[in-house]
């Protein structure tokens, strides 16, 4: 629970560090984003290890991820570093999955996380800090373009995982 909430509390810090949009501040924002992202792994790891998996954690963990990612994506969009289509697709997919999870919960169906969804999250956690940092000429040329490309991979995985969740729900209802 503490790790989950720490991700939410890190959002204003990360977005605030992004505001000046200069290399030193962007590096600090990227590091904070990575630290917040790493808590996602440890949150699940320790919950399973110590048998403290809770309904709060099951529901709030993905919400904390979405708050972190969508807040930073909104800032990157405002800075002109990413396309609106990326944000629209990611937000639409997240809302769609949230709806499916709600309906599934009402039907007392648990839909396990899908591989494409896990890969989507991993790609976002790699791409977003790179895009935050931006261009580092002459040290790391094209860094921003690499992050942008990886973020598009996560967008494609967002679509794929959304389809997987939907079919997983339909399959669970029939089974």
Image (tube, rainbow, N blue to C red):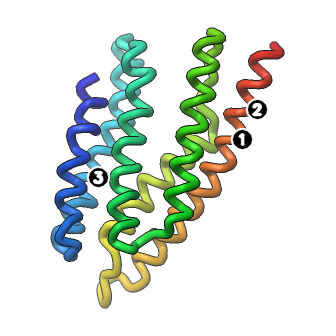
Residue 135 x %, y %: 34, 81
Tag 1 secondary structure: helix
Does 138 sit left or right of 152 as displayed? left
The quarter of the image holding the C terminus is top right
Residue occupying the point 71% across, 33% down: 166
**On the image, numbered disc 2 is attached to which residue?**
167
Q: CA distance from mark 3 to mark 2?
A: 32 Å
Tag 3 secondary structure: helix
Q: Is residue 143 above or below residue 35?
A: below
Q: Is residue 15 above or below residue 36?
A: below
Q: Earlier in the sequence, mark 3 or mark 2?
A: 3
**On the image, numbered disc 3 is attached to which residue?**
33
The picture quadrant where one finds residue 112 is top right
Tag 2 secondary structure: helix
Circles 3, 2 touching at the beta carbon (< 8 Å): no
The quarter of the image holding the N terminus is top left
Residue occupying the point 22% across, 44% down: 10
Does 41 sit left or right of 152 as displayed? left
Question: In front: 150, or 108?
Answer: 108
Q: CA distance from mark 3 to mark 1?
A: 28 Å
Q: Nearer the viewer, mark 3 or mark 1?
A: 1
Residue 32 x %, y %: 23, 53
Determine crowd level at label 1: few under 14, some 14-19, many 20+ residues with C-alpha closer than 10 A. Answer: some
Does 101 sit left or right of 163 as displayed? left
Q: Earlier in the sequence, mark 3 or mark 1?
A: 3
Circles 2, 1 touching at the beta carbon (< 8 Å): yes
Residue 163 numbered mark, or none: 1
Q: CA distance from mark 2 to mark 1?
A: 6 Å
Residue occupying the point 66% across, 50% down: 159
């Amino acid at each position: 629970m503490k790790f989950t909430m720490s991700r939410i509390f890190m959002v204003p810090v990360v977005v605030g560090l992004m505001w000046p949009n200069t290399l030193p501040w962007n590096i600090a924002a990227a590091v904070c984003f990575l630290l917040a992202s790493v808590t996602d792994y440890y949150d699940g790891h320790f919950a399973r290890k110590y048998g403290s998996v809770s309904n709060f954690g099951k529901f709030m963990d993905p919400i904390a991820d979405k708050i972190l990612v969508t807040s930073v994506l909104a800032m990157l969009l405002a800075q002109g570093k990413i396309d609106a289509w990326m944000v629209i697709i990611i937000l639409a997919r997240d809302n769609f999955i949230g709806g499916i999870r709600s309906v599934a919960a009402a039907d007392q169906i648990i839909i396990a996380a899908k591989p494409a969804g896990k890969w989507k999250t991993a790609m976002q956690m790699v791409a977003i800090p790179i895009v935050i940092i931006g261009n580092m000429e002459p040290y790391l040329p094209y860094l921003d373009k690499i992050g942008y490309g990886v973020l598009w991979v996560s967008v494609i995985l967002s679509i794929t995982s959304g389809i997987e969740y939907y079919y997983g729900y339909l399959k669970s209802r029939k089974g």
